[in-house]
Image (spheres, rainbow, N blue to C red):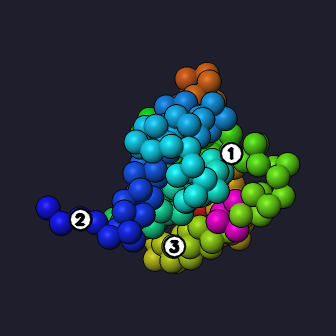
Amino acid sequence: MARLTRVEQQARTHEHLLRAGRQVFLRKGFLAAAVEEIAAEAGYTRGAVYKHFGGKEGLWLAIVEADAGTHLDGLRQALGQTGDRDELIAVLSGVAHDEAAKWTAVTAEVLAATAQQPGVAAQVAALQQRHDTQVVALLAEQFERLGLDPVLPVDQIVVVIGALGIGLALRQAVLREPGADVLAQVLGTMLRTT
C-alpha cells in the first residue's frame, strides 16, 4: 500500500474530523460537544481540531459549508419533481427525518452561542446569506414554473421558513410535537396561484 503524501494525510484528517464533528454534534448538541471528544472520535488529539478549523465553531461552519451543496441539490431535485402548489408546500414543510431535526436544534444552539461573538457571528451570517441567496433563486424559479404568486418577496419567505423551521424543530426536540402542519399552513397563506 502506497504511503500517503502530507497533503493527502491532511485531507484525510480534515474529512475524519468533519465526520466525527457531525456525529458528536448530532449526539450531544453543540454546547455539550467537547473538542476533545470530537478529536478522539476521529482518532486524533484536540490539536488537530484547532489546526484544521480553529476550534469548535470553525468545525461547525466547515460542516455546514461541506453539506450546503448536498442540501441544495436535494432540495432542487425534490422541488423539480413537484407539479403544483400543494406538492411544493409538502416538500418545503415535509416532516424532517430525525437527523435533520437534530441538526436544526444544533443550529439553534450555535446561533445562540455565537450571537455574542462578533467574529464568529459574522462568519455564520455570511454562510447563511450565501445559502439563502441560493435558496431564494431556486424558489423563485419554482414559483414561476408553477405559476405561484407569493404574498411576500421570496427572500422574506426564505427567512420565514428558516426561522419557523428552527422554532418548530426545537419544539419537536423538546416537546415532541411535529410542526410540519404549522409550516404547511403558513406557506399556504404565502403562496397564491396566479
In the image, residue 3 lies in the stretch drawn in magenta: no
Q: Which residue is mark 2?
A: 3
Q: Residue 61 or 147: which is nearer the viewer? A: 61
Q: Which residue is mark 1?
A: 110
Magenta span main SS:
helix
Q: Earlier in the sequence, mark 3 or mark 1?
A: 1
Where's the C terminus, which quadrant?
A: bottom right
Label 2's element?
Answer: loop
Cα distance between the residues tagged 3 and 1: 26 Å
Judge whether residue 174 can be spotted in this image.
yes
17 left or right of 50? left
Q: Earlier in the sequence, mark 2 or mark 3?
A: 2
Cα distance between the residues tagged 1 and 2: 38 Å
Looking at the image, residue 85 lies above or below residue 130:
above
Amino acid on which disc 3 is placed: Leu
In the image, residue 125 lies in the stretch drawn in magenta: yes
Cα distance between the residues tagged 2 and 3: 43 Å
Instruction: Give the magenta range.
Output: 124-128
Amino acid on which disc 2 is placed: Arg
- Point out the frontmost of discs 2 and 3: 2
